[in-house]
Image (tube, rainbow, N blue to C red):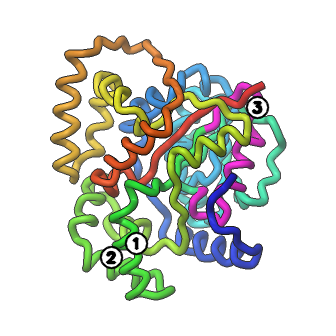
Amino acid sequence: MATQTVRTQAEIDEIRERVTGMYSKHPWPSTREADEEMGWRLRMLGIRKSDYEGKKVVELGCGTGEYSLWYATHGAADMTGVDLSKGSLALAEQKRTSGDVQNVRFLEKDILKLDLPDNTYDYAYSVGVLHHTGDTYKGFQHLCRIAKPGGVVVVSLYNSYSCFTLRVKQAICRLLGGKDLDKRARIGRKLFPFTMYSMNKRYHETNYELISYDIFAFPHATFHTGAEVLKWFDANNIEYTGSFAPLRFRDYFYAYSLPEYQSFKRTFSGFPLIRLFSWTMNKISTLLFRTRPDEHKTFPRPSWLSMFLVQMVWVCVGIRLNCFTIAGRKRA
């Protein structure tokens, strides 16, 4: 079902060492404000509070722990974050301790050799990590395996369409910097100042240098389409519930009518065209829809044509939507 290149175990091991080494030395993102984005994202994924409140939740690739800590402080009864980067896990644990969050634990484990038991978690997710592992589909299979029947599965990956222009910039950094990740990051900062400016504003000007490593220096990544990931859902018995950003045009009007958009729009800082588009969509959508704070919409599975057309538009959005997220529920 996976369309990515098949790699030997030795190649995967080398990717793992280089990726974990970089993120241990340059933990990312470390200052992400999960509160501003989670409300809008979860609504469009078809996820309700009852899906994670009082439940067992797991994150594969927790990094510096922002999302794990968000779930732990927003109702999850038992939160587990898994990562292989010692530097990132150290920051996550530091945040857990300083916040005195008792219902979360961080484990050092390889996602591709995951030994967590089958059918254990009510809510299993991975955000922006599996594409760095060397075998994205295998990581996704583990995500589905450890979810309980009836439980939620959420995966976020680099998108082949929205990453198009970014991939050109990354290729230039690889060509000029070779395997020297520090050099790649320096070249990215010098050659692409507008990209750096935009992403620095998106993260509220908190970690400029770290951004250059995550954008331009990472050792390995794969890129995926909505149709490809939905094939993975079918192969692993996962029923689609929603996507963020939406993979159907009509769902954008509903999305921009939601009150949660008001918090998320802060993340468009640094992207003037997206801010203008979002402001316009919000004004139009609030006239067309009257949503209630407790309303939860069910999203039909998008057609192949709808996904293709939406993702073609994402080419223009570029780096602000480099990852897309799809959610589903594991069938009993």
Residue at 39% x, 31% y is 40
Disc 3, disc 1: CB below 8 Å?
no
Labels 2 and 1: the sequence-earlier one: 2
The mark found on residue 67 in the picture is none
Q: Rounded to the nearest whole Å, what is the CA distance between mark 3 and mark 2?
A: 42 Å
Q: Position of residue 296 (x, y in %)?
A: 47, 16
Residue furthest toward the front?
A: 305
Disc 2, disc 1: CB below 8 Å?
yes
Task: Tell me if residue 28 can be seen.
Answer: yes
Q: Which residue is mark 2?
A: 188
Residue at 73% x, 35% y is 237
Residue at 67% x, 43% y is 80
Task: Tell me if residue 203 can be seen.
Answer: no
Q: Position of residue 261 (x, y in %)?
A: 31, 30
Give amino acid for label 2: Gly
Q: Which residue is mark 3?
A: 148
Judge whether residue 188 is colored magenta.
no
Q: Rounded to the nearest whole Å, what is the CA distance between mark 3 and mark 1?
A: 37 Å
Determine the secondary structure under disc 1: helix
- Residue in front for this viewpoint, 206 or 160: 160
Q: Position of residue 177 (x, y in %)?
A: 41, 87
Labels 3 and 2: the sequence-earlier one: 3
Q: Which residues are magenta?
A: 130-153
Q: Position of residue 173 (x, y in %)?
A: 38, 80
- Residue in front for this viewpoint, 9 or 49: 9
Mark 3 surroundings: few (<14), some (14-19) or many (≥20) residues within 10 A: many
Labels 3 and 1: the sequence-earlier one: 3
Q: Which residue is mark 1?
A: 216
Determine the secondary structure under disc 3: strand
